[in-house]
Image: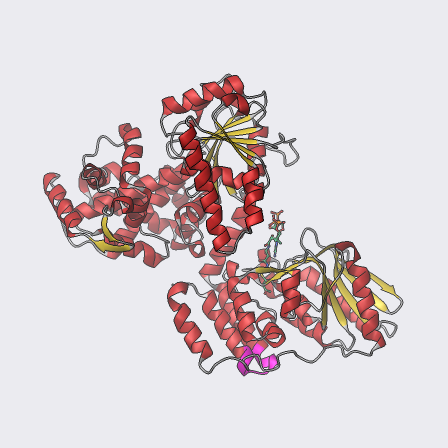
Amino acid sequence: MSELIQYRLEDGVAFVGLCRAPVNALSQRLRAAILSACERAAADAEVKAIILHGADGLFCAGADIAEFGTDAAFAEPSLPDTLMRISEIDKPVIAAIGKLALGGGLELALACGYRVGEPGTRVGLPEINLGLLPGAGGTQRLPRLIGAESALNLILSGEQIDAERARLLGILDRLASEAKHLLDEAETYARELIAMSAPALPPEHCPRPAEDLPDGFFASFRERQESLWKNRLAPRLVLAAVEAACLLPLREGLARELSLFKQAEASSQSQALRHVFFAEREAGRIPNIAPDLPLRSIRKVAVIGAGTMGGGIAMNFVNAGIPVMLLEQQGAALDRGLTMIRKNYEISVKRGKLSADQVEARMELLHGTLDYAELADADLVIEAVFEKMEIKQQVFRTLDRVCKPGAILATNTSSLDVDAIAMSVSRPQDVIGLHFFSPANVMRLLEVVRGKATAPDVLATTMAIAKRIGKLAVVSGVCFGFIGNRMLEPYSREAQRLLLEGATPAQVDKVLTELGLNMGIFSMQDLAGVDVLYLIRQANQAATAHDESYCRIGDELTVLKRHGQKSGRGFYRYEGRERQEDPEVVALAERLSQELNISRRAVCDEEIHDRCLFMLINEGIQLLDEGIALRASDIDLVWINGYGFPAHLGGPMHYAEQLGLERVLASIQRYRSELGAYGEMWFQPAPLLKRLVAAGKTRIERF
Ligand code: CAA
């Protein structure tokens, strides 16, 4: 028997334990081992029932994602064939689902006649997050178990549901009283089934899965969702597969599902989403920091500044059960901050996401203070005060005086030099940047900015605490704007320059949203505040002063007090939430073009795409070369989670690889020669891009 399976027979019940750490991903070898163990049990006359379980408790997290895109994905025995064979065994097979059954793991359980969970069990079909659909019977067997509509919702949402909900839906037959009794109670169930000569497969709960659905359900569902799905392929394939479950006999439905699955698996969208899956896991690994490096303990956090940012940051920690001291200079500002936090929680109560008791428990973990002395025992202090170097340094000098030795001192700056802040204290090794994105309690991204002096255990501790509060942490070195905002700069510069050359904000934004970005650059600037971006530019003026046209329109809008959504006017005009193109902005662009001697012309969509995105990509490649980003995939995560870049394109670096690095380079070089002095100035291909192309590389990596 394979080392991937633990097999034992106990008084007529065969236990087949999957043991492929850490999550029993169903690789070709594990599939073969499961099949062979099940065949052995099926052929053994002494075996009356079979229990499939995770040898270490955890049942199965699905197909092995690393096999997709390789021959191993469908190498024999394929997952669908393995599961078909299990469903044909003429003895009851019971899945004992410890911890989780996801994707192919749940499909394995669905191929069994019976399923038992434990109180903490989670089940789901998250394939949609990988641009896939369940490809081993999930779209066919689940509708036959719980009905087409419930199955469709579960598959399209990718949601992981808890044990009780799974039991109510009919996915689990029983729940063990406690996790440690799962196998015993599954065995009891097996013996009951043997005693009553239960069939290997019980009759289908919903043999006609669409029975309760109105006529035309699938067509109208498709029509309603079409605009939300935009250019995503997987949801459309899911719908087709579930529809097939309602129209075709099981075997034909399974064949249809498999062909749709193969289409999804081969798509560039799924490739991109699989890249994102592994990128997220890779981001936590930091070269030269051992995974077992002892961490500093974080039991108490302090946040300086109770504004929108500070309040949002504080919420993250109390949400995770960590007490927070919130410090302000004035009592009124502190009260405002605490009231705003409570209001935010109350909105969650109204939406049914939190109970009133939970809100009280969280508010109790939050303490306001006006006195720095109260921060003496904080393990981690995060400064979120006004974005000005002198003010931040002043705060850090005070922290240096009051905080205990070993406390981590973090700044939430979005663009200032973390090393200069660290120099203001006597313990620069304890200083780090924690750049939260706004709204800080909602946005998943956290840029962790490692200063020159930051100690390895400070970095490792902040990465661990980020995970604890549910953030996706990406390490950045120190430079203006770190990874995200530094790349935003050339992207924004090109977009603004294109307005002077003849494009309109709506045209530029349309090209970007059609590509799948959540927001166009001008809508984003209006939301962030045209004035706020102006101040950031001012701080970086030395790098851009040689170009008179540089973000000139943004500067003029700031002077005109067109600060964006908050003032009702910015790059657009707003009526309520309605956004409209504003002829005044077009007129302003025309006037500036004349002043700056820039000739206007019709700008085509392709030019908008290439100039905005390739300049963004070029900057990302440069960041990698400088060592500011550890790896290209980290840059992808920053842009997907902080700036709404579509995950199904894999982030800007992966997108560039998909388009072809030669194409990106050729386009940059073309604009360099076509755009005259402006092109000469800005369209400088990153040296790393040139080296990669010259060496015939197709992936972006340090080289
Ligand atoms: N295939 C391959 N590797 C997997 C995997 C999978 N399905 N699920 C997890 N892993 C790996 C991770 O890459 C990670 O490896 P490293 O330690 O080398 O980085 C390790 O298992 C642990 O994973 P996490 O760091 O994510 O640990 P976690 O405890 O935070 O989360 C999890 C565990 C909830 C299972 C999470 O990993 C997860 O959501 N996995 C993906 C589940 C999924 O999408 N399943 C569907 C697969 S597609 C499918 O099954 C298609 C089909 O229909 C046939």
Q: Is residue 673 left or right of residue 527?
A: left
The mark total stands at: 0
Q: How is the image coloured?
A: secondary structure
Prevalent SS, magenta region: helix
Q: Residue at x 40, y 31 (%)?
A: 332
What is the x, y in percent for residue 261? Answer: 53, 68
Viewer-nearest residue: 18 or 576: 576
Viewer-nearest residue: 172 or 1: 172
Q: Answer with the quadrant where ligand 1 appears in the image.
A: bottom right
Q: Which residues are magenta?
A: 245-253
Look at the image and tell me whether residue 463 can be seen.
Answer: yes
Q: Residue at x 57, y 47 (%)?
A: 358
Q: Is residue 558 left or right of residue 234?
A: left
What is the x, y in percent for residue 690? Answer: 36, 41
Viewer-nearest residue: 632 or 503: 503
Eyeballing the image, is 481 above or below 278?
above
Eyeballing the image, is 174 above or below 197?
above
Viewer-nearest residue: 304 or 481: 304
**Is the N terminus in the top left, top right, bottom left or bottom right quadrant?**
bottom right
Q: Is residue 197 left or right of residue 677?
A: right
Look at the image and tell me whether residue 625 can be seen.
Answer: no
Eyeballing the image, is 172 above or below 19?
below
Verify whether residue 64 appears in magenta.
no
Q: Residue at x 40, y 34 (%)?
A: 414
What is the x, y in percent for residue 205? Answer: 65, 78
Give residue 389's quadrant in the image. top left
